[in-house]
Image (cartoon, grey):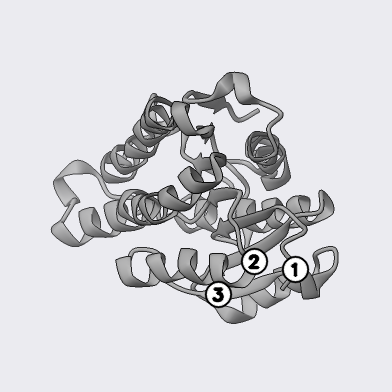
Amino acid sequence: MSDAHPVSIVTGAGSGIGAACARMLAERGHAVVLVGRRHDRLEHTRASMAEPSRHLSLVADIADSGLAYDIVDRTVAAFGRLDALILCAGSAPHKPIDQTTEEVLEEAFFVNAFGPAFLITRAWPQFKSQRAGRVVLVSTLGTVDPFPGFFAYAAAKSATDSFARSIKTEGKAYGIKGFAVNPGAVETAMLRQNFSEKVVPAHRALPPEHVAEIVVACACGERDEDNGKSILVPSP
């Protein structure tokens, strides 16, 4: 495949914010590696993107370190470079503290914290060799104002806020930048798994595209002043 385009990996690309980011990056000329757990959803997103043949769909659960490492390795093998990690995949188990089990904690932390960490650490040598790279982590407003029942989810996402700060510190010498984007309620399937419209009306939820615009701006070098920051994006 050609390495003439900037190359971005987008996790959670089968729907919601991830799918919106993939489409926007394609419009900006990026070659996109779409990552998710369902091939049909990834291919649906890819078909809706500019120049579908430019992009690559990889089915993987990023909570598995071997699969996460393989995503980075296959991307570099296919395109010869990696310019941005866009980490949108997430899982939001909704349980109060006294119902939080080991399984709930593992789901929250492996998908929301460990998975991104696996990808970042694997991509880091490539970024260093290029002396450039950007990581954008989709976090949540819940890291500063957790909704009841998000004991595990908000804590796991807090790790991604910390990742952005560490990327700024350790990446400074290599031109590597990191950003966390922390939206409130976003109109996605994950939101509706936990909350009906009676609890979170549609007009109080952000469209995925609104969040994606901020994510893509970070990935494309348009918000470098926010390097290392958590960018809060409240719901209407």
- CA separation, marks 2 and 3? 14 Å
* Left or right for 148, reference 74: left
Residue where numbered disc 2 is placed: 79
Dot 3 alpha-carbon crowd within 10 angstroms: few under 14, some 14 to 19, many 20 or more:
many
SS for dot 2: helix
Q: Is residue 99 above or below residue 78?
A: above
Residue where numbered disc 3 is placed: 58
Find residue 129 and name its label.
none
Q: Is residue 236 above or below residue 60?
A: above
* Of pointers 1 and 3, the one earlier in the residue sequence: 1
Q: From the viewer's side, name the closer residue of 232 and 68.
A: 68
Question: Mark 1 or mark 3: which is in front?
Answer: 1
Q: From the viewer's side, name the closer residue of 117 and 75.
A: 75
Q: Residue 60: horizontal and vertical position, in percent? A: 45, 73
Instruction: Give the residue displayed 80% in from the left and 64% down from the top.
Output: 49
* Of pointers 1 and 2, the one earlier in the residue sequence: 1
Instruction: Give the residue displayed 58% in from the left and 80% down from the top.
Output: 39
SS for dot 1: loop
Residue where numbered disc 1 is placed: 2
- CA separation, marks 1 and 2? 6 Å
Three-letter amino acid code at disc 2? Answer: Phe
Instruction: Give the residue displayed 68% in from the left and 41% down from the top.
Output: 216
